[in-house]
């Protein structure tokens, strides 16, 4: 029994390591281009809404607490609270995605979506001229937003998968499948959820806080 | 004091023992070994089968909230090159808190911890070796990208 549990936990950690490798590539691309074009990244970051980002960080950290409580309830064989905590986690995860969708909607209106709806340089001609000079003629605010959407998009895909799993687990938990001494699946789901949280913990300061608290925010 | 209490009262005490915060890591471990009423897995190191007291989770969450506020405060002054390392240090602290407590690395086997550590080891290779190339290019007059 102990060895089985160990295997399951270890297998999940191995998967999480591969997840970190995948995100690690994106974080590396981010580091490289931010190092090359610090001015453009700062300018791009000013167009993100720091307060929505902060609320989302709070929501996600809180959902990690409720997920940990779900694991706790499964371990204590408390079926009702297991289902409740999973449902609260689901609601928080959905709230995160809802806020993210609002942010992306604003980005769309402001023409900050590379490839689909991009008119940053048209809207900010003086800024664009300045940046083009400073960055040797390459459109690097575009690069910031490409990286922004790749990273937050991949993160959101993980959130959607996580939400599907949490919902499924809530139904299965209601049927008593995790409170009969078989609580480990909930623990493993918890590991995944916490990892997605950890990735956001890094995304938040790297994407939103580049220009500082007083210069970003507001969305303009 | 807290650990004596949890030893004495066993499994019923889950959420309520450990009032003494300072003694609490010892208390949790004692707790983990002594209070499994599940009939199996009572070997010395039951690795991921821990029911931590609720209070521990609340302390962990409060720590994360404090760190979130500190991140925001640290982003107010313009510290030049220092804003980024400070923000990253706080993010690493948050990630460690989540991994050690929420992901139960504190109670995991050495092998599991090795796996978790390996992820960061490989990331370090990715960043250090590749960035050392980019950073050192200007020193040797190599053409830029």
Image (spheres, rainbow, N blue to C red):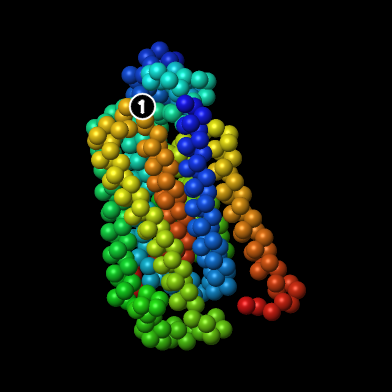
At 51% from the left and 74% from the top, the residue drawn is A39
Q: Which residue is mark 1?
A: A181
Question: Is residue B133 rendered to the left or right of residue B33?
Answer: right
Q: In which chain is the residue bearing label 1?
A: A
- Residue A64 percent across, percent down from the top left: 37, 44
Q: Around disc 1, counting alpha carbons within 10 Å, would you say few (fewer than 14), some (14 to 19), or many (20 or more)?
A: some
Q: Say which quadrant the N terminus of chain B sits in.
A: top left
Q: From the viewer's side, name the closer residue of A3 and A211.
A: A3
Query: Above or below — where is A181 with respect to B76?
Result: above
At 40% from the left and 12% from the top, the residue drawn is B8
Query: Above or below — where is B51 with respect to B122?
Result: above
Choose top left, top right, bottom left or bottom right for residue B113: top right
Check the image and name the residue furthest to the right.
Answer: B140
Q: Secondary structure at mark 1?
A: loop
Q: Is there any visible trace of residue B2 in the rendered image? A: no
- Residue B57 percent across, percent down from the top left: 39, 35
Q: Is there any visible trace of residue B4 in the rendered image? A: yes
- Residue A51 percent across, percent down from the top left: 34, 60
Q: How many marks?
A: 1
Query: Above or below — where is A182 with respect to B142?
Result: above
Choose top left, top right, bottom left or bottom right for residue B36: top left
- Residue A79 percent across, percent down from the top left: 26, 31
At 50% from the left and 33% from the top, the residue drawn is A6
Query: Above or below — where is A147 with respect to B91?
Result: below
At 31% from the left and 57% from the top, the residue drawn is A97
Q: Say which quadrant the C terminus of chain B sits in.
A: bottom right
């Amino acid at each position: 029994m102990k060895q089985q549990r160990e295997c399951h936990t270890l297998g999940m950690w191995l998967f999480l390591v591969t997840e970190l490798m995948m995100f690690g590539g994106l974080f590396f691309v981010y580091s490289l281009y931010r190092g090359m074009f610090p001015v453009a990244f700062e300018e791009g970051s000013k167009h993100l809404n720091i307060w929505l980002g902060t609320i989302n960080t709070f929501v996600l950290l809180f959902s990690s607490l409720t997920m940990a409580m779900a694991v706790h309830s499964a371990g204590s064989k408390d079926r009702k609270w297991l289902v409740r905590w999973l449902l609260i986690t689901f609601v928080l995860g959905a709230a995160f995605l809802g806020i993210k969708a609002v942010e992306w909607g604003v980005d769309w209106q402001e023409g900050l979506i590379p490839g689909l709806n991009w008119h940053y340089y048209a809207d900010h001609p003086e800024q664009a001229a300045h940046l083009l000079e400073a960055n040797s003629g390459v459109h690097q605010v575009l690069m910031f937003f490409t990286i922004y959407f790749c990273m937050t998009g991949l993160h959101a895909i993980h959130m959607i998968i996580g939400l599907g799993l949490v919902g499924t687990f809530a139904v299965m938990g209601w049927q008593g499948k995790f409170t009969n001494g078989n609580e480990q699946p909930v623990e493993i789901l918890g590991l995944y959820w916490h990892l997605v949280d950890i990735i956001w913990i890094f995304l938040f300061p790297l994407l939103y806080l580049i220009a500082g608290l007083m210069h970003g925010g507001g969305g303009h | 004091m807290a650990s004596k209490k949890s030893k004495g009262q066993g499994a019923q005490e889950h959420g309520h023992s450990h009032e003494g915060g300072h003694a609490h890591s010892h208390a949790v471990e004692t707790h983990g070994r002594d209070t499994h009423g599940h009939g199996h897995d009572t070997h010395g190191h039951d690795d991921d089968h821990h029911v931590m007291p609720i209070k521990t989770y609340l302390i962990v969450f409060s720590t994360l909230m404090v760190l979130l506020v500190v991140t925001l405060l640290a982003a107010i002054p313009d510290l030049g090159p220092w804003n980024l390392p400070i923000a990253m240090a706080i993010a690493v602290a948050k990630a460690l808190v989540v991994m050690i407590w929420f992901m139960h690395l504190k109670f995991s086997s050495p092998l599991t911890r090795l796996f978790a550590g390996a992820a960061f080891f490989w990331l370090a290779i990715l960043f250090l070796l590749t960035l050392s190339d980019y950073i050192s290019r200007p020193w040797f007059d190599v053409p830029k990208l």
